[in-house]
Amino acid sequence: MNKRTYRIGQIVPSSNITMETEVPLMLSRAVVPNDVTFTFHSSRAPMKNVSAPELAAMNSHMERCARELSDARMDIIASACLVAIMSQGAGYHRKTQAELEAVCHVEAPDTQVITSAGALVDSLKAIGAKRVSFITPYMKGLTELVAGYIENEGIKVKDTISLEIPNNLDVGAQDPKNLIEIVKRLDTSNVDAVVLSACVQMPSLSALAEVQKSFDVPVLSTAAATVFQILKALKLPTVVPDAGELLSGKY
């Protein structure tokens, strides 16, 4: 049997630690054929504080990061900073995806490209969500931009919680188990989905399964949505135990 190894590339903020932890962990648990393995590779764009100026500056490094990863012939590259995309205006994930694909395809024409922002939007659409509530670590102004972006995609936002943590390293240091209590403050009445972490840096994986037990609707995170879209793009089963209903194989 020939072993198939998929190279997974991520473009991450320089201060991000979570996507390089949670994405490999979920893919290591994925229920895929025995001959499938994954390797993980990253390129970093400068960003320390989650502010509009730093997010815009980070975006200017995206093409350089994609070019570096494409030198190693990735099977798929995920641009992994949701708010950097969503803070730039409606539908910006499509523009970013197209631009990064053009860069990658010079050296690696078969490389697929997704964004974490697009992954969350597309995953909410995949489960048929029309109304959602979500938690972010952002300042309220940035959370409002994320809510507006999601609503522009035709999905109503019922409620949000902003933890207002400006430093990205501090975001990554949050205990995901705290979300089990925080989500109880979120108005989730009549929603179709709950996004436990609408941020690639705020850890949530170890809380997803427990929170999912408390809801009859899918509970997901940006990281889980990114893994869902990676598996779909690679035409692999979208099954990861203990990662919420999105990764149950149902969708």
Image: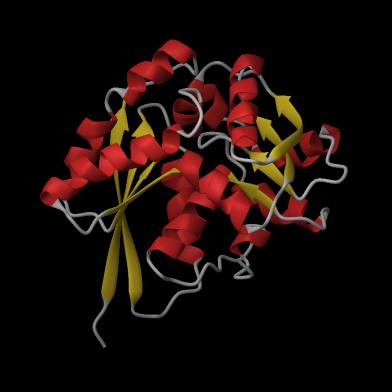
Dividing the picture into quadrants, the one containing residue 59 is: top left
Between 228 and 137, the residue placed more toward the observer is 228
**Residue 80 in view (yes/no):** no
Q: How many marks?
A: 0
Give coordinates of residue 225: x percent, y percent: 54, 51
Q: Is residue 126 above or below residue 95?
A: below
Which image quarter is the C terminus in?
bottom right
Between 175 and 220, the residue placed more toward the observer is 220
- Identified at 30% across, 64% down, the residue is 6
Give coordinates of residue 162: x percent, y percent: 69, 23
Which image quarter is the N terminus in?
bottom left
Q: Residue furthest right?
A: 189
**Residue 78 in view (yes/no):** yes
Dividing the picture into quadrants, the one containing residue 102 is: top left
68 lies left or right of 95: left
Give coordinates of residue 219: x percent, y percent: 70, 51
Give coordinates of residue 230: x percent, y percent: 42, 57
- Identified at 29% across, 31% down, the residue is 62
- Identified at 29% across, 22% down, the residue is 60
Between 171 and 76, the residue placed more toward the observer is 76
47 lies left or right of 5: right
Q: Residue furthest bottom?
A: 1
